[in-house]
Amino acid sequence: MSLKQNLHNLKEKYRGTKMEQSFNALHTFLYMPNITTHSGSHVRDAADLKRVMNTVIMAMVPVLLFGMFNAGYQMNGQINGFEAVDFFTLDNFLVGLKKILPLLVVSYGVGLGIEFIFATVKKHEVEEGYLVTGMLVPLIVPIDLPLWMLAVAVAFGVIIGKELFGGTGMNVLNPALTIRAFLFFNWAAWMSGDKVWVHGAVDGLKASNGVDAISGETILGALAQNKPLPEHWDAMNSFFGFIPGSVGETSTFLIVLAGLFLILTGIGSARIMISAVIGAAVMGLIFNGLVDSGAIVEGSKFYGLMHLPFWQHLLIGGLAFGIVFMATDPVSASQTNTGKIIYGFLIGLFSILIRVFNPAYPEGVMMAILLMNVFAPTIDHYVVQANVKRRMKRLKLKTA
């Protein structure tokens, strides 16, 4: 008897019991649901929620694998010198795997566990929405984040950020960013600063030159403090991702490829992505203009990030990752075409604005997206009302 037949028999066995919904979730995760419509008109398409989620996960896998290599590269580079370390080595990958795999296990274990509990108690189907959130979370947190902190934050994000609103498709805020915001506002010292972004390497041992192998800050952190940047933090390395940062945010190159993949598959919104990039560029140009005009002089508090060429803002920090994977969340983003353009533009604008004017937290994309999540329904409301007024005006002209 085949595995599929055995699972089907078990599915019938659990029908009507408390475990029915949980087992159905496992069955539909492995196989396509055998449910067909019986009445009404429906769009017949191969895409369902599970396939949409799997497509997004496929786009994130290269970013995740690169992040594992980069974690080891940053560690070994600090100890032995970056010029003496090769990037794609097994040692680099194993360091990243050792640190990132537990984050993935905790994220999926706690999140899906809560989803199954809610489905069992409330007797509804287990939704696949957390499949993407479970992978997003490890990509947007420091690799040395204590696992118990991550578990508490995931529980908060799933229960308060999603299930409280009715589950997948009903949440107001992006669940992954809700989890990150909870972490940041409760344990800020573990989420930002110069001791969290790169793994502590040898855990108290001395490097070959006798200096403690400690973790290092990001480009944003250095610029916010007007520090000179090392030579290996140039624009090219920033674009390809050979810099310190959260696991998924470093390689703009892979993030751009992922964005194109999501657009071509019809999952991601090109309007949101393009307008967000334009919004960030506009704000960056405004700050560059202030520096060029002499309004902001070298050595002043905000000079470092204002002086940075506008296009380099797109290469550092979590801006690109946030635009591609979280600003485009179809649930919490604007739904109208015009609304998507306004929504994306304001995300880019506010991201750079917050990044520059908050030296204690030189990364604004999380707060910008969460802010616009709240205002997305308002944007859509006024867009729809404007369309209604235009149509009513045309109707009056025709009947006059």
Image (tube, rainbow, N blue to C red):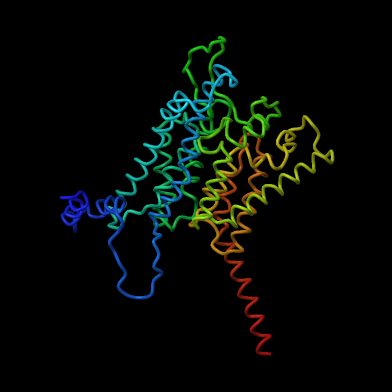
358 left or right of 129?
Answer: right
Residue that lies at the very extreme toward the bottom in this rendered image: 400
Point 41% across, 50% down: residue: 54
Q: Toward the viewer: 345 or 258?
A: 258
138 left or right of 314?
Answer: left
User: Would residue 185 be visible to someone looking at this image?
Assistant: no
309 left or right of 344?
Answer: right
Point 63% across, 78% down: residue: 391
- Residue 204 placement (x, y as % from top left): 48, 15
Q: Toward the viewer: 151 or 307?
A: 307
Quadrant of residue 313 within the rendered picture: top right
- Residue 227 placement (x, y as % from top left): 69, 26
337 left or right of 299?
Answer: left
- Residue 243 placement (x, y as % from top left): 58, 30
Q: State which quarter of the image contains the C terminus.
A: bottom right
User: Would residue 211 be visible to someone looking at this image?
Assistant: yes
Q: Toward the viewer: 293 or 11?
A: 11
Quadrant of residue 352 within the rendered picture: top right
- Residue 61 placement (x, y as % from top left): 45, 41
Picture layout, residue 261 above or below residue 305:
below
